Image (cartoon, helix red, strand yellow):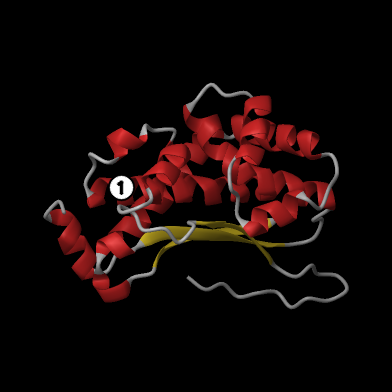
């Protein structure tokens, strides 16, 4: 859904997009190892899932990533608009699609440190919601895996990256219930709005 953008001026910061989840790989063929890292799920077990199950997991993962950006931004008093959508829908073939997302941030007060904290939030989301990983585990894991260009650009705005990661994790832990519930709502809304052809393909369990 498009959002009206505030005009940039002396008293208004221009909108910034965070996230960019989804790396363009197909959901099924050739993507299982990267999906396994994203879901903390063994690749050989992912290979046993149907396209339907994988796209639902993909939607949930992308939604949680984008909602986390939004929650940290909102903590800093900014307006945030998380979005996920289906990408690469060639020929309405589910196996050619993936779920991508971004979060538009609008408002004043985006310091370099806040940029960095918002950038870390997307990656931290899953660990905060569903594992016992602490902030240091999350910090180390972030730099061991490929991240979106927008998240990396945000994080590199400030030199105290460890402190920014701790801040993001602290905010997300405080709002853990909201993180889980809002991500579930966003993923559900996305799945309900899929094109009719793809929903039919999902119903037959391909």
105 above or below 129? below
Question: Which quadrant of the figure has residue 169?
Answer: top right
Residue 158, position as x, y percentages in the image: 83, 47
Determine if residue 83 is in view: no
At horizontal 59% and vertical 37% (from top left) the residue drawn is 124
Q: Is residue 79 left or right of residue 161?
A: left
Residue at 49% over, 57% down: 23
State the residue in front, 147 or 52.
147
Which of these two is toward me, 16 or 23? 23
Residue 104 image offset from top left, x and y in percent: 62, 63
- Kindly give the residue lying farthest to the right in the view shown: 10
Is 121 or 77 nearer to us in this picture?
121
Q: How many numbered circles does the render carry?
A: 1
Please tell me which residue is depicted at 58% across the width and 48% down the height of the picture: 146
Q: Is residue 57 above or below residue 126?
A: below
- Residue at left offset 47%, top offset 29%: 130
Which quadrant of the structure image shows residue 79? bottom right
Residue 122 shows in this picture = yes
Residue 51 image offset from top left, x and y in percent: 24, 51
Q: Which residue is mark 1?
A: 54
Hey, which residue is sitting farthest front in the picture? 30
Query: Is 115 displayed left or right of 64 in the figure?
Result: right
SS class of the residue under badge 1?
helix
Report whether 195 appears left or right of 3: left
Instruction: Locate residue 54 relative to residue 100 in the image: left or right.
Output: left
Query: How crowded is the residue under tag 1: few (<14 C-alpha within 10 Å), some, or many (20+)?
Result: many
Q: Nearer the viewer, residue 182 or 156?
A: 156
Q: Is residue 187 above or below residue 85?
A: above
Residue 206 image position (x, y, % from top left)? 16, 54
């Amino acid at each position: 859904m498009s959002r009206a953008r505030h005009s940039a001026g002396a008293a208004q910061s221009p909108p910034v997009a965070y996230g960019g989840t989804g790396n363009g790989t197909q959901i099924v063929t050739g993507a299982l190892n990267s999906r396994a890292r994203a879901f903390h799920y063994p690749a050989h077990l992912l290979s046993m899932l149907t396209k339907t199950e994988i796209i639902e997991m993909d939607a949930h993962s992308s939604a949680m990533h984008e909602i986390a950006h939004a929650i940290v931004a909102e903590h800093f008093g900014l307006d945030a608009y998380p979005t996920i959508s289906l990408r690469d829908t060639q020929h309405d073939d589910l196996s050619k699609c993936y779920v991508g997302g971004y979060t538009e941030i609008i408002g004043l007060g985006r310091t370099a440190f806040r940029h960095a904290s918002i950038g870390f939030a997307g990656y931290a989301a899953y660990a905060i919601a569903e594992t016992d990983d602490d902030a240091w585990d999350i910090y180390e894991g972030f730099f061991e895996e490929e991240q979106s260009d927008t998240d990396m650009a945000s994080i590199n705005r400030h030199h105290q990256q460890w402190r920014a990661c701790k801040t993001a994790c602290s905010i997300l832990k405080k709002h853990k219930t909201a993180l889980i519930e809002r991500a579930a709502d966003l993923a559900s809304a996305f799945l309900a709005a899929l094109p009719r052809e793809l929903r039919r393909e999902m119903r037959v369990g391909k």
